[in-house]
Image (tube, rainbow, N blue to C red):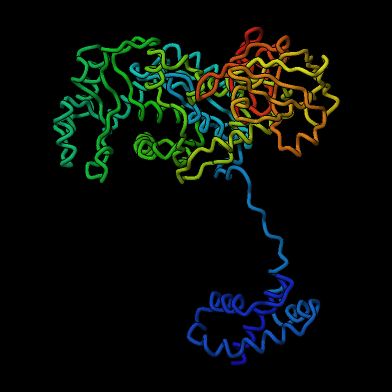
Amino acid sequence: MDDVRSVLLIAALSNAVKHKSVPAAGAVMGAILGTHPELRSKAGEIKGLLGSVLEEVSSLSAEDREEKLKIIAPDQYASLFEKKEKKKIGLPDLPKAEGGVVMRFAPNPSGPLHLGHARAAFLNDEYIRRYGGKYILRIEDTDPKRVDPEAYDMVREDIAWMGLSIAETIFQSDRFSKYYEVGKELIQKGHAYVCRCDNERFKDLKMHKTACPCRSQSPEEALDLFDQMLDGAFTEGEVGVRLKTDLSHPDPAMRDYPLFRVLTSTPHQRVDAIVYPLMNLSVAVDDHLLGMTHVIRGKDHIANTKRQEFIFRYMGWETPVYRHYGRMGIEGVVLSTSQMRAGIQSGEYSGWDDVRLGTLRAMARRGIQPQAVRNAVVEIGIGETDIQFSWENLYAKNKEIIDSQADRFFFVPDPVLVPVSGSDPVVAKAMRYPGDESRGYREIPFAGSLYLPRAELESGAAYIRLKDLFNIKVLHEGDTIRGEYAGDDLQEARSKKAPIIQWLPENHANPCTLKTPDGDVSGVCEPEAAMTQDRIVQFERVGFARIDTAGNPAVAYFTHR
């Protein structure tokens, strides 16, 4: 048992040195059985020895414990004082990236960009900044059914707002000839064929892992049919080009998937075409021709990655490094382009920047800063675990940016004009920014009547503090409300637990509508707050807001608290 006692002594000394205290029996026992599972059968004997070991360790000074451990277990002693590598904050390193990277952001122009797009856009941009290289904006507009002509400009505007380091912009609709060339080469190599089976027939064959008759075409036959497709010899739905894959693949969607289709019912805005490349073909071709070294996208594209790898392998191309991140649930806003468009057309939403939508332009209109969105999605990272987007985290990061910039002002929601007696005219002085006199003061003149929030008056408070002014008694006389001056003492108001509220005098109140996700709030604000468009302010006790329309009346968009 001498060996067992030595093990116990080392464990007890390690615990004592690490925690700078007498070790607990349970902690030492747990450590022993965890690191030496072969001793679990001797647990009874160990407990009998443990008491004397703990007595020995307890009798030593802290210095003696260290010295003894250093002597009998130098490696264990050294491990306690090794500097632990701090957990790396931020995105993980990419393999094969040391010489620089070529990456892309590839939206479809079906509408403006939203928070989901921002994740991919910023993640790629962060790696471009880290490693150097080239960031390509690739507009994936090969499906005319999914193209909104107005979205081309909207996407570019959203890109500019994000501040991405885009070096080059590519439109896939300009590159059809390149897709045709690769399609012909795949056919020539015997890796693709022209399928004339209708969809139901092919689906049945595919599900039974059976080759369609068209699969046996010679390359010459297939090339001739492909040329006929390009010449307009076939109608929509009559024919298509398929890639030969693995008919026994466990996923039916991977079996001989399509590369090209004939489409005539929906003309394209930018290209006069009949034969359209499908996504997996155009993406694989461009990833190669544009020299993509790394592709970062959601794990909902894992199957597409596997499909595209067939093309890379058949063409003898080097595949990029792929990373797939988990889904990001975003609650509280509408993200579906079709839903948004329908809501705009019906009048439910005011436009693509309606604050109830999850578009980037809605974020911008509210006063959310692009750097805050960047910081939030980078913190989420590229892990494969599905996560829920945290609005509170975004707001916290946005507050870090705007708080110091935002001057403070009064905003009175649902205002009620209340006469106040007993006080001479006075000018209140309120700080533009708390604790910073260098920012100056706002001067708010009082002369008899002022606006107060209806909710505060209906709360039943009989004694309130007008912020930066004085105290008043609130008197309800039938259907009317009036106030009486009740002194200047702030401490008295606090002792009475009086609410401290915003107010504005009748002659110093600018009509202002505050637009929020829950609806519009009518009120009045300080005239100075409404002087400058696109200004971020903080309405005290309400929250941050962006002035969207300056002047009288003004319109502000609620940002967050």
Residue 19: x percent and y percent? 71, 70
Residue for point 49% across, 26% down:
358
**Residue at image coords 69%, 12%:** 509
Residue 410 lies, in percent from the top left, at 70, 21
Q: Is residue 274 above or below residue 73?
A: above
Furthest residue in direction right, as rendered? 438
Q: In this orientation, does residue 314 appear? A: no
Q: Quadrant of residue 286?
A: top left
Q: Which residue is found at the position 63% from the left and 52% from the top?
A: 87
- Indicate the position of residue 340 as horizontal and vertical percent values: 41, 20
Q: Residue furthest front?
A: 478
Q: Quadrant of residue 309?
A: top left
Which residue is drawn at the image coordinates 23% and 24% (left, top)?
240
Residue farthest to the bottom? 1
State the residue lying farthest toward the top: 552
* Left-right relation of 441 to 72: right
Residue 304 in picture, x, y percent from top left:
36, 36
Quarter of the picture containing the N terminus is bottom right
Count of marks, rendered view = 0
* Image position of 521 with respect to 115: above or below: above
Asked if one can make out residue 327 in the rendered structure from this viewpoint, the answer is yes
Residue 224 appears left or right of 136? left
424 sits left or right of 322 in the view: right
Relative to 386, is 403 above or below?
Answer: above
Pick whichever, 193 or 393, lies toward us.
Answer: 393
Q: Nearer the viewer, residue 221 or 22?
A: 22
| Left or right side of 556 for 359 | left
Q: The C terminus lies in which quarter of the figure?
A: top right
